[in-house]
Structure formats: structure tokens, C-alpha cells
Amino acid sequence: MPDSPDTEPDAVDPQAVEPEAAEPEAPPAPLLELRDGLPEVVETDARLAEACAALAAGTGPIAIDAERASGYRYSNRAYLIQLRREGAGTWLVDPIPLTTLDPLQEALGDAEWILHAATQDLPCLREVGLTPTSIFDTELAGRLLGYPRVGLATLVETVLGLRMRKEHSAADWSTRPLPKAWLDYAALDVEVLLELREHMIAELEKAGKTEWARQEFDNLLGFEPAVRVDAWRRTSGVHRLRGRRALGAARALWEARDAIAAERDVTPGRILPDSAIVAAATAMPTDRRALLATPGFHGRGASRYSSTWVDALQRVREMSEDELPTRAPRGDGPPHPRTWAEREPVADRRFKAAREAMLNLAEVHHLPVENLLTPDYLRRLMWTPPETRDPAGLAEAVRAQLASYGARPWQAELITGALVGAILGADVEPAAGPEAEPADGE
């Protein structure tokens, strides 16, 4: 008997339906390869003289990078320096066995250095006598251009369409001899910096940010790593400690560990992890047996240096209350902005208005807000602004105060108007809201 017209059709077998064709994945970018092959590592003064002659005879800027042993060594020294220049090729210099790098500094002359994340490499290069007279920082250029990710591998793939290997970024570069795969990786880090710089120069010019970049790069020439005050307070987990004596124990253990690490040139965490410091500072054991039995107290140097740890804890037990650290030492800057609403309502209004203005300006100009103005500068200015409220005088005073902090002229020019507006606007008491309507029946 045939189906009637209103009979439901048979259910469709879902396995019989062909799936929609998936979008084909884009092929991976071509892998970056060394154009000139892997150079021999410069390990003798005679070989360094050859490198210096080649680099001095080259033309244009010099791509430079350094490899350290972060996570393995206490020091921040350079264990390998990579250089590349047009007409000179790539050179890999091992500074450890060399008498001096003064000939290399002379060969580089006043050529511009191209670095990626210059603040990471400048201190260790300066330590071996290498100092630039001008810089182009590809990471900082990427920030000014508004790239969302500015790691070297990402920028190279985005801008140049080439894929970089990054598997040896966390290697122990104090290893000798250095494996060939690591040397390949190191040489590739300067392989494309010359080309990347050319592309970014054009982009900066098109975006009207060439002068911004010049001021930022000039500012890097005077870069000095920040000196950490009370560095022991950065011990992971120290915030969980209760009482000043426990804090004193953490400080004493941290300082003892730091001294051992410096002497052995080993990163401190490889001697005793932060978690072990916190565990011992919490338990305050009085002897070696109790210390080693403390839950969470472990590490390569836990037993080896047990007498050092016990002595440190004993000294803390003998300290007077005045000798112990406080929970939060007073800094030279303003308090945290979250406390401003209660302590200084006008400053709170200033800061919130200025912060919103900074976010808007950063979005308009396509760059991270922290590159528009260092957050600490904004907090300091909004906490203690100039006294004058004459708009023209206030603008001049704001520019001077920003300059005293270290802000660059392009930053002050861009943001002064917004900051003046925030300061003046915050002085006006906000209008009280309308009184609440009485509820029905009241």
C-alpha cells in the first residue's frame, strides 16, 4: 500500500549525509634556513681578529644577539654573541675563552645595532665591553606599530612570512661544547634582523611613528636594569607567611641561598626552591633533623647546606622585634590606587579619568597603553599633580613633571591635554544623584 501524502518521510541516516567540506588549512610558512651555512665559533683571539676585520669591512647596521644561561646560572653573563652585517655574514663569538672583546667594540664603531628586546641583552653585552651608539629594537618597533604579539618568531612569520625554530630558547648556554643544533638556532636569531628592520622602518614611516621610535631607541642607550629593593620579598609564596618573625626567617634563608648561588654561579632555585624557604619560615625548626623532616622542605641543597639554613633560622629567633621586617615596607611612590577612593577621593577621580583617557588614546594610536606612558608615571602624576590650575600653566607643569620621570617628548605631546583635563575635571565635585523616589505606600 502506497504512503499517503501526509505520511512523514523516513528518517535520514546521519551517517549517510556527507559532511561539509572543512576549510583547508593554510600550509605552514617556509622554515627559515641559514643562507651562508653555519659559521665556525670564534673561540680564539686570532679568530676574533678575523671576525673584526670582516665586520668592520661590512656595510650598514649590525644585527646582534646574546645567549645567556637564565635558569641555570646566577650571573647574567653572555655565553654566546651572534652578529650579522651586510657584506660580512654571520659570526658566532664565544666570549668566555677570549682575552678581551675590545677589538670587536672597535670594529662595530658607530654602526647602528639591531636587537630584539634590547633591554634583555644590553646589560650582558655591556658587561663584556660592547656598547652601542645607536639602536633599532624590533620588539619595541612592533609594540609601537600595534602588533598584538611581538616575539621574534611571531614577528618574522607575520612580517616576513618565514617560520623560525624556537626549541632551544631555554637551553643552558654555559654548556661546552655547544651542540650544533643550538648553534643553528643561535645563528638564525640574527639571520633576518636586517630584513625585518627594513620592513619596520617603512611601516613606522607610513604610520607617522618614525620620530616616536627614534626617541624610544635613543632612550634605550641609557638603559640600566632596575635595582630591586628587598628582593627577598619576591619569594613565591611569601605573602602566606604570618608574623614578622616568619618574614625575617624568609629573608634570612633567601639571603643565605643567594650568597651560595652567587659563589657557585648557580641559579638560586636550583639550590633551594622558594617553596622550601616558605615551608621552613613557617615551621621554624630548631635543628637539622627537624628541618629536613619539615613537609615541603626539599631541594638539591636542602641537606647539603642544612647547617647554613639552621644557623639562619637561629639568628632570626634571636632578633628583637625592631630588627624584623614589616609586612609592607613604605615605598617612595604613591599608595596603590585601590586605596585612593577612601583616602583621597579627588586623586581617585583624577586617576580614573586619566586612565580612561590613556586607554582611549592607546586605542586610537594602535599601541599598548603601557607604551603610551609608563603606568608608574601616571600614578605618580595623578597622586601629586602640579598645584597650578591655570590651564596653560598646568599643561607646562605636567610636561615638566612627565619629563622628570623619564617620559619621552612624543609621549608628553600626545597625552598632556588629556591629563590636564583629568586634573581639572577631578577638582569639580560630582553632582549628587536624585533622591530616591519613596516606595508605594510610604
Image: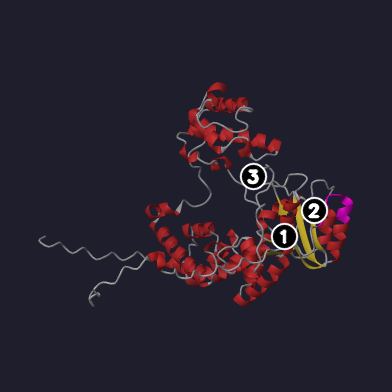
Q: Which residues are magenta?
A: 39-49
On-image quarter of the N terminus: bottom left
* Residue ID at (67%, 72%): 199
Q: Position of residue 111 (x, y in %)?
A: 78, 65
The residue closer to the viewer here, 355 or 141, is 141
Q: Which mark is residue 93?
A: 2
User: Picture coordinates of residue 255 (x, y %)?
Assistant: 61, 35
The reply to whether residue 68 is in sight is yes
**Mark 3–mark 1 distance (CA, rounded to whole Å):** 22 Å
Report helix, strand or loop for mark 2. strand
On the image, numbered disc 1 is attached to which residue? Answer: 188
**Residue shown at the point (43%, 65%) measured from the top left:** 353
Examine the structure image and report whether residue 40 is included in the region drawn in magenta.
Answer: yes
Residue 277 placement: quadrant: top right
Q: Residues within 10 Å of mark 1 (few under 14, many from 20)?
A: many
Can you tell which quarter of the image residue 176 is in?
A: top right
